[in-house]
Image: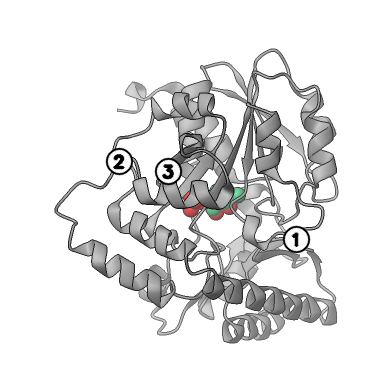
Amino acid sequence: MKNAARKNILKIKPYVPGKPIEEVKRDLGLKEVCKLASNENPFSPSPKVLKAMQKALKGLNRYPDGSCYYLRKEIAKNLKVKETQLIFGNGSDEVIFQVVRAFVNEGEEIVIAHPTFLMYGIVGQIAGAKIKTIPLKNFRYDLVAMKKAVSKKTKVIFIANPDNPMGTYVTKKELDVFLKGLRKDILVFLDEAYYEFAPKKDYPNSFSLLKKYKNIIVTRTFSKMYGLAGLRIGYGVSSEEVIDILNRVREPFNINSVAQAAAVAALKDQAYYQKAIRLCEKEKQYLYEEFKKFGLSFVKSATNFVVIDVKKDSQKVFQKLLRKGIIVRNMNAWGLKNYIRVTVGKPQENRKFIRSLKEIL
Ligand SMILES: Cc1ncc(COP(=O)(O)O)c(C=O)c1O
């Protein structure tokens, strides 16, 4: 069947996710495993969210509401945008697919940073697009070089803000300069999956930019701070014109009803989630201090994960941590051989990680 597949598909390296806890327990015969690999919130969803999910379970014999009526209303109200400016995805990942499916023809170009979130390149390759990759400068997006890389064929530019894997962010000023004079038929994809963890001072206000530019789409997710990664729900906010186009390629029932109920309840339970953010920040500082004591360099992060230079083959460090029941991300997939990425976990998980890392190194 290999000959039957589209040629560009065979060139794609499949996305390798962080290992699931159960798989590591099974494979290594471990009882206790902590996952610090996929930038999830280490705590369960709030009790109010769990209750809303329980209630939604009874209606699972029916298809979900394809319009996400209640969730749409809630988000539009919170963000002060029109309901028709929103599109939902089975994770914000799906919005990346929708955008590329709707806007990028085979042979056209997508501009991304390197390294960045792997899905931009993968989704672009599926579409048969040419992927232009612009190296980071001091672990940060080089927006000047990204703008220079634009050609007549450029259709979408992806900016993860803050970025994964490095955790750095693009400032308001940098983004303003970037957008000024950029062709209006290029869609700028501002991926704000880690928005809730980013510092607010010089971070761009994407929704005020949306008033000025019709060619921006901002995505957010319930997978990170809101701790609903397992339910798969995210969304995009853009001009009505862009959303109308995306709705034509959206699968009709892409958001399940339990996810819709959970997301509405999560938005109404901000106090619970703000507490999780404060704890994450405190624990991140703990990790920084430990890395410093140990002489390890790391990239200061505007997210809930940190990239560390372990000065050794990261594959080996990753394997040794795994045997101790700790799953991190080895950065080989991004071409960074001596780096690992660790998600900020619960306090006891972070301490176990530091102890184990010290033993290994
Ligand atoms: C930068 C970035 N964007 C998007 C996603 C996808 O998130 P989800 O599809 O769970 O909303 C991730 C997940 O790791 C990410 O790191």
- Determine whether, in the image, residue 226 is placed left or right of residue 162: left
> How busy is the neighbourhood of tag 1: few (under 14 within 10 Å), some, or many (20 plus)?
few
For image coordinates 74% across by 68% down, the residue present is 310
Which image quadrant is residue 65 in?
Answer: top left
Residue 58 at x, y = what percent?
17, 63
- Location of the C terminus (image quadrant): bottom right
What residue is shown with label 3? Answer: 89
Does residue 361 appear in this view?
A: no
Residue at position x 56%, y 41% from top?
A: 81
Between 251 and 113, the residue placed more toward the observer is 251
Amino acid bearing label 2: Gly
Q: Nearer the viewer, residue 36 or 64?
A: 64
- The numbered dot on residue 92 is none
Quadrant placement of the N terminus = top left
Q: Secondary structure at mark 2?
A: loop
N-term mark: 2 or 3: 2
User: Given contact means CB atoms under 8 Å apart, are the residues at marks 3 and 1 in contact?
Assistant: no
Asked if one can make out residue 173 in the rendered structure from this viewpoint, the answer is: yes
Query: Under tag 3, what secondary structure?
Result: strand
Confirm if mark 1 falls within 8 A of ligand 1.
Answer: no
Q: Are marks 2 and 3 in contact (CB under 8 Å)?
A: no
The residue at the point 29 percent across, 53 percent down is 257
Q: Which mark is residue 66?
A: 2
